[in-house]
Image: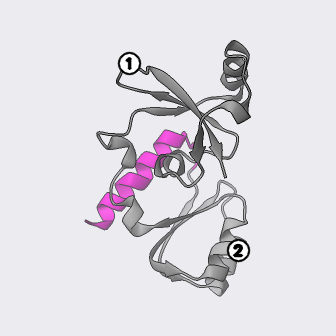
Amino acid sequence: MSDETVNQTIQAMFEARGYSRPPTVVKVKKVSVEYARKLLKQTNPNGLLVVYKEGISTPARKEMDSTEGVELFKRDDLLFNVTEHDFVPPHRLLPAKEVRQLLVRHRTTLKQLPKILRTDPVNRFYGGKPGDVYEIQRNNEEGITYRVVVV
């Protein structure tokens, strides 16, 4: 698999998220805490997406994970677009207004909805944050389901 495939997956991710100006993409072999701090100083206001090939030190990961707008992806995780897999049904992040209507219509709360982890590959693709809600269109008798993003 090539860097072209990774670039196509990143482009599809940006399109799915509806970015008018995408975040800065940095591709590196390894990430140290010093390099992480350097990257964080030059962060684009629209975010920073770091694609690393071999690894990232634990202190660097902690520092970047605790910074808003920074996303880390291992290169191997971007070799295919997870949303195009046959077993992944269409997902859609709901706007806040639709979430409120959903909760009222079903007389429920966010805590009562089924969960999807923040680390789920589909959620990482769409960039959902804790508290966001996905509408998932199933291809069987289940119809539409909803999931809330949790930590």
Q: Is residue 42 visible?
A: no
State how far apart marks 2 and 1 are (Cα): 44 Å
Q: Residue at x 39, y 60 (%)?
A: 78
- Give the magenta part as a residue range: 1-21
- Residue plotted at (62% across, 83% down): 35
Quarter of the rendering occupied by the N terminus: bottom left
Q: Kindly identify which numbered label has been placed on residue 42.
A: none
According to the picture, the residue beneath numbered tag 2 turns out to be: 63
- Looking at this rendering, what residue extends furthest in the left direction? 1
Within the magenta stretch, is there residue 7?
Answer: yes
Viewer-proximal residue, 150 or 36?
150
Given the image, on which type of amino acid does mark 2 rest? Answer: Glu
Front position in the image: 112 or 31: 112
Viewer-nearest of labels 2 and 1? 1
Instruction: Give the secondary structure at mark 1.
Output: loop
For mark 1, what is the residue?
A: 141
Q: How many labels does the image show?
A: 2
Q: Is 16 within the magenta?
A: yes
Query: 13 above or below 67?
Result: above
Q: What is the x, y in percent for residue 42?
A: 68, 71
